[in-house]
Image (cartoon, rainbow, N blue to C red):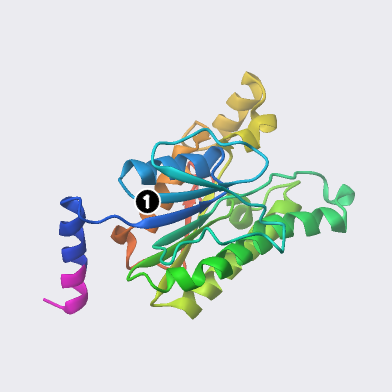
Amino acid sequence: MPAGLLKNWKTILECAGLACMATFLVIGASSGIGHALAGMLAGQGHRVLATYNTRSPQPISGVEWFPLDVLNPQADWSFVPEQLDGLAYCPGAINLKPFARATPDDFRKDFELQLIGAVRSIQASLPALKKSSSASVVLFSTVAVQSGFGFHAIVGASKGAVEGLARSLAAELAPAVRVNVVAPSLTDTPLAAQLLSNEERRSASAQRHPMKRVGVAGDPAAAAQFLLGDGSSWITGQVIHVDGGMGVLR
């Protein structure tokens, strides 16, 4: 049996016997997809470090919480452990407006949160990730990058940059660190509350998706959980669409 395949089977068997516990860092886990992902990973028995900024997180059993402002160049990253097996960057924004009303500052602010925050997080965690035998980074994009929607110029531009970053890093960091992206459609989280503020809006959004429902936080979180784990050890540089079919079906 090839050495790589033997290693994968050994890892699977060890994890089945609960001898395998990884350490993951979830940036922006106070609510929504990040919160769901932290809970899923902790529920598997992994060590989970999670960060929050302005929103106080609802506690999750087994999750260690740390305050962090990714927009602060002087942020304290001392909580990052000696070794990390995975990093998920979950902060985001949905800033929708007509292009004629969008200012350069709108684009800068979104770019700072969506891309530069991810860059800072990966750079602060990279030494620890490189000490893992199977490290993974998961970033988040949006279906709007592939499909193109009106009023999405700001978020489409910044998330498009995130996808470009992920593919470049996947090439540069292979085989030590895998880098992938999850690209959801509209998901029922606090971030999207204004877009789903009443039953009429929720129903209209559901009907636009081939699966005829709005996503929930657990949908993209489950994809991220898979990409962080050993079951995806031969997947890197990919954008996984968790969008109810919105991106490719008509």
Task: Report whether 198 appears left or right of 131.
Answer: right
Q: Position of 215 compared to 191: left or right?
A: left
Residue for badge 1: 47
Please determine whether, in this image, residue 43 is positioned above or below residue 155: above
* In the image, residue 2 lies in the stretch drawn in magenta: yes
Q: Position of residue 101 (x, y in %)?
A: 88, 48
Q: Is residue 174 left or right of residue 54?
A: left
Query: Crowding at label 1, few (<14), some or many (≥20) Cα neighbours within 10 Å?
Result: many
For residue 204, which quarter of the picture?
top right
Rendered-image quadrant of the N terminus: bottom left
| Farthest residue, direction left | 1
Residue 45 percent location from the top left of the image? 30, 46
Q: Residue at x 49, y 38 (%)?
A: 217
Q: Which residues are magenta?
A: 1-7
Main structural element of the magenta stretch: helix, strand or loop? Answer: helix
Name the residue nearer the viewer: 133 or 221.
133
In this rendering, the answer to whether 202 lies above or below 159 is above
How far across and down, in percent of the image, does residue 9 sit? 17, 64
